[in-house]
Amino acid sequence: MNKPTPLSGFPEFLPSQRTVEREVIATLSRTFELHGFGNIETRAVEPMDQLLRKGDTSKEVYVLKRLQEQDESRDKGMGLHFDLTVPFARYVLENAGKLEFPFRRYQIQKVWRGERPQEGRFREFAQADIDIVGRDTLPFHHDVEVARVMLEALGKLTFLPGFTLQVNNRKLIQGFYAGLGVPDVEETMRLIDKLDKMPATEVGKLLVAEAGLSDEQAAKCLELATITATDDTFVEKVRAMGVESDLLDEGLTELATLINATAPLNTERVRIVADLSIARGLDYYTGTVFETRLDGYESLGSICSGGRYDALASDGKTTYPGVGISLGVSRVLVPLVQKGVLDADRKVPSTVLVAVSDEESRAEADAAAQQLRAHDVACEVSPNAAKFGKQIRFAERRGIPYVLFATRREDGTEAYEIKDIRTGDQVPADPATWTPANQNDLTPQVVSTGSTTGNDNEEQEK
């Protein structure tokens, strides 16, 4: 069999790299559960008519079909989900009678998307979503809550670079455009959303040519998009532009409330800003919108996005509004891991290698290993009875910090000593009770092995 060629867009991790991903997932899960979010997992496939409801996604959907299917008409209506929002909407409708509203859920799962692979974009990748869904109504304070929860969760991932959560409000920009008298509000928002991918002068030309704005209207829309603030001073900046509408006022109030409520969470690593250039091109957002940039890796685009949608799902009688935010776990981790920025401090979970003096004593080594495992010390037994120096080097290559040796007391009874191969310290140890002095040695630790600053000048994603 020839050596297999890696599939582009389907990243895989080595065991130590997978440790990094597992630590991220565990930290996110713990934080989400501290805030009362329950975990769900939805099926990998959804009906095609459901998958195609979310905008122009037909080119991104992987269709599910059996290779040996005789009836060509069967299974054509199913595809792999390309995000977690579409299956979640279906899940809410199917289980509405069993759920308590507002329903708070988190979901960390693989998704599949048939797009061109590039840095930060894959065909199979993991996402971590939180959403709060109501029945018919959902108070605005939940918008503040999901922002606070994700800020807290990301802030606990201290081995990652810092990040900025950028927030805007659809009511603000829609109300501004309406008050300005633009002829096509939706198209204007779609074009403004391109500002992170093309120069403002080019977006201005498109606003005139494709959205039908006058040069003055286009200039005002671009001016609005330049406004940013870490507090509510953006309100006066917008009002100074002289545009008025009730929807604009509502959006300004909501955004100011969110920024003020989350301001205490700002740190050197974690920042939240009002950024009026954020529009989010998808048409189902109706209020708050989020995007997030990773310090030094701005070329990845937004790594964590979401917002408010007043109609996540509807059965014709009841509407289920929601607000949520989604972190691209693979989008963040794969580039950092591939560049050698993040890794675990050892290749295996073992804290201890139990040395084997000779093959006749392997049973005793296995028994000592079981004593260690009985009180949650991960270990493995040496695969052979080589010289102790070779067994120590075997442990070093795997990153195992301790080696346990069997010895004999003067009276001939068996005893053990344990060696910290990093320091050379060797002391008597009872495998039934021994535990490392540094509790971090019990599990592999995520370490930053290089600069957490990327190349700001990398080409922006297409």
Image: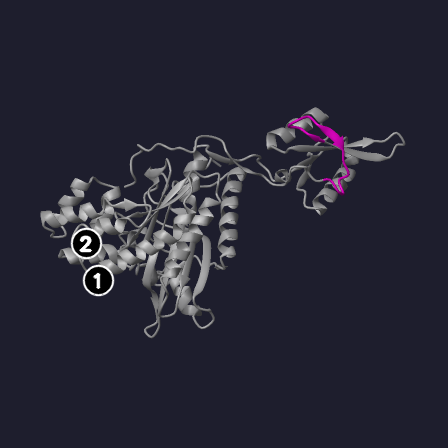
How busy is the neighbourhood of tag 2: few (under 14 within 10 Å), some, or many (20 plus)?
some
**Amino acid type assigned to the residue bearing label 2 in the image:** Glu
Q: Main secondary structure of the magenta part?
A: loop
| Drawn side of residue 349 relative to residue 162, left or right | right
- The residue at the far bottom in this view is 317
Q: Earlier in the sequence, mark 2 or mark 1?
A: 2
Q: Nearer the viewer, mark 2 or mark 1?
A: 1
Q: Which mark is residue 246?
A: 1
Q: Which residues are magenta?
A: 419-434
Residue 179: x %, y % from top left: 16, 58
Magenta includes 421? yes
**Residue 59 appears anywhere in the view:** yes
Residue 450 lies left or right of residue 404; in this view the side is left
The colour scheme used here is one colour
Quarter where residue 433 is shown: top right
Side (left or right) of 98 relative to 367: left
State yes or no: discs 2 and 1 in contact (Cβ < 8 Å): no
Q: Residues within 10 Å of mark 1 (few under 14, many from 20)?
A: some
Q: Which quadrant of the view contains residue 16? A: top right
Residue visible at 42% across and 64% down in the picture: 91
The residue that mark 2 highlights is 187
228 or 153, nearer to the observer: 228
Q: Is residue 186 magenta?
A: no
C-alpha distance separating marks 2 and 1: 21 Å
- Image location (x, y in percent) of residue 218: 14, 48
Disc number placed over residue 348 in the picture, else none: none
Q: Nearer the viewer, residue 125 or 155?
A: 155
Res. 194 image quadrant = top left
Q: Amino acid at mark 1?
A: Asp
